[in-house]
Image (spheres, rainbow, N blue to C red):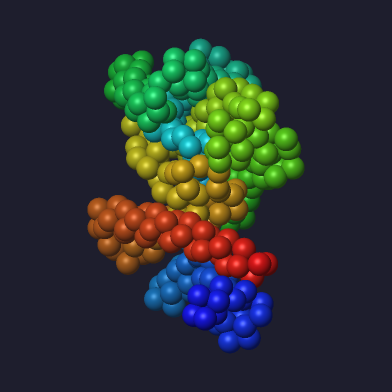
Amino acid sequence: MTATMDQTPLSSDPARRVLGLDRYRLLQGGLFALRTGPFLILLVLIAVVSLTTPVFPTSRNIGNVFSQTSVIAIVALGQLLVIVTRGIDLSVGATIALSGVVGAIAFEHTSSSVLVIAAILGTGIAVGAVNGLVYVYGRVPHPFIVTLATLSIVRGIALWISHGTLISGTPSIVQTIGGGTRGWLPYSIFVVAGLALLCLVLTTRQVFGRWLYAVGGNPEAARRAGIPVRRVLVSVYVLSGFAAGVGGLLTAGLIDAGSPTAGDLAELDSIAAVIIGGAAFAGGRGSVINALVGAFTIGVIRNALNLHNVDAFYQLIAIGLIVLIAVEADVLRGALEGRLRVAQAVRSG
């Protein structure tokens, strides 16, 4: 008799149906909170900082936040594409430095702004291509190894060709893009908006975007489905290198020089931004909007701590703690999604 009652379908037992519905709604609510968490955290953070620091919500300071966060945001867009495919790019900070140095050296030999910009962006693309090709066709077990190596190599090249010193001078157009403003808005934020829009279209409206998430979700299944997995993987590292090149362009324009030490820890900032935004190292998950939210969360935290005269090393501690919380939230989100699928199956049964 007891066995018969235990096997009663959910739909035929009112008490169990109500209990199951409450549990289902609770799971849905928890999952919604986790998915919108990065955006809600940013809003709460902005509200708290605005209340504690009257300077924060002023247009001038907002412009500073945009300017300080632009490079992180752009590099995070490239890092997002890599992480979605279960990869990682540790070379982006060094690429920012090398591209700026190459641009400054090019400016010493030519007055053409087009050639200088091409040299900067081309350097980023070249580093990204090396990362992708060595990882894919060199059959390296994980991109961590390749990009860790190129981080050291590229940073070393930047120091070598610059003799370890700042190389002053960039074209006026580069200075305008990197450090110019329109009113209180920096031009760099328009670059962020433009690249974010292109990235959004690429990931949501193009076949390449579907390939991207398919490769990250299950590479073997993607291969069997006829998706050119190798080309997709090489492409995302080239795009990440391009994003780092744009970051190098903005940095060089902001300081009007090529610096071999520029982009220090940019790789960690970009990874943190993507993870705070809800992407998963396991691949197959992540969005452009959330990556930007993660980048601006880092920017607001740093700006707030600066306004409160907090030592810089506390910024690293704060961002590290937030990354740990974001990773744990991703684990919890995965568990809730699994339970929600089970609950949906029980309800439909």
Q: Position of residue 294 (x, y in %)?
A: 49, 54
Please give the name of the residue rendered at 47% of the width and 48% of the height, measured from the top-left corner.
Answer: 280
Give left or right: position of 228 versus 255: right
Please give the name of the residue rendered at 42% of the width and 56% of the height, measured from the top-left corner.
Answer: 331
In the depicted structure, whether residue 248 falls above or below residue 326: above
Please give the name of the residue rendered at 29% of the width and 63% of the height, measured from the top-left corner.
Answer: 309
Label count reads 0
In the depicted structure, whether residue 285 falls above or below residue 135: below
Q: Nearer the viewer, residue 126 or 306?
A: 126
Query: Can you name the residue that lies furthest to the top here?
Result: 109
Please give the name of the residue rendered at 51% of the width and 64% of the height, measured from the top-left corner.
Answer: 339
Q: Position of residue 149 (x, y in %)?
A: 34, 23
Q: Position of residue 289 (x, y in %)?
A: 60, 53
Q: Nearer the viewer, residue 338 or 146?
A: 338
Q: Quadrant of the C terminus?
A: bottom right
Query: Can you name the residue that lies furthest to the bottom here?
Result: 15
Residue 293 seen from this side: yes
In the depicted structure, whether residue 167 falls above or below residue 305: above
Q: Position of residue 36 (x, y in %)?
A: 55, 65
